[in-house]
Amino acid sequence: MEDAPTNFSLLRNNYWVLRHGRSIPNERGLIVSSLENGTREEFGLAAMGIEQARLAGELFKKELEEKNFSIDKVRICYSPFARTIETAREVARVLGISFDSSSCIEMIELRERYFGTLELLSHDKYTEVWALDEKDPSIPPEGGESVADVASRLAVALLNIETAFQGCAVVIVSHGDTLQILQTLLQTLKETPSNENMELRIKNCIVNSVLSQHRNFALSTGELRRII
């Protein structure tokens, strides 16, 4: 019998997050954040990233077995970028799930945070953006998305998942900033139980005092983390 979602979270599913494995942009030190570039095969996983994805899949499989989850209750939700598709596909392969099945769901809302005019520049620029985020997460980098912008589309993804599934083990395969922001939402939901409907509860989490802390939830490439 599968574990029920934690009672105080009032969520219908159990959640893990997985940052994509080490990618070619990671190795080249480039910011690749637009859909146009991110979906190109040349910006997929590096060899190390494929191995990291395999190991993450093995760890996820082990945790599922420990918590008595059956494979038919697993949902793999992933960003449409090449590096996340390849990571999600490897996890599905380890679990014995067909990547073309209804258990694997591509979600545009899980895409990388868009960094605007910093696209294809050095990833050293991230630190400038994160410093701005800490001061005011509602201010975007030039031409890009703010933390609040990303949180708003992640709220849509979370509501869609919670509406579509119940009692599932959901692994969300996405990107560094996107998953940091998602974790701030999930952690706040976990810590602030409420009788309000889910849409309102999530909306109440999208405030500067919460979102400015997203760097506290940083993930390494290929890192799997159970949230709820």
Image: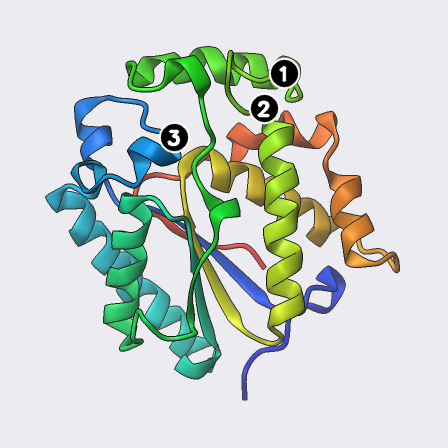
* Residue at far bottom of view: 1
| Label whose residue precedes the other's in the sequence (1 or 3) | 3
Mark 2 or 3, closer to the camera: 3
**In what quadrant of the picture does the N terminus appear?**
bottom right
| Label whose residue precedes the other's in the sequence (1 or 2) | 1
Q: Helix, strand, or loop for circle 2?
A: loop
Q: CA distance from mark 1 to mark 2?
A: 5 Å
Residue 42: x and y in percent read 16, 37
Relative to 67, is 5 on the left or the right? right
Q: Is residue 199 visible?
A: yes
Relative to 149, is 172 on the left or the right? left
Say the numbered circle drawn on residue 34: 3
Residue 165: x and y in percent read 60, 72
Residue 26: x and y in percent read 24, 30
Q: Which residue is mark 2?
A: 146
Under mark 1, the amino acid is Ile
Under mark 2, the amino acid is Ser
| Label whose residue precedes the other's in the sequence (2 or 3) | 3
Q: Which residue is mark 1?
A: 139
Q: Are marks 1 and 2 in contact (CB under 8 Å)?
A: yes
How many numbered discs sit on the rendered protein?
A: 3
Residue 120: x and y in percent read 29, 19
User: In the image, what residue occupies the spot 44% across and 21% down?
Assistant: 115
Q: Are marks 2 and 3 in contact (CB under 8 Å)?
A: no
- Mark 3: few/some/many CA within 10 Å (<14, 14-19, 20+): some
Foreground residue among 59 and 39: 39
Q: Is residue 121 above or below residue 215?
A: above
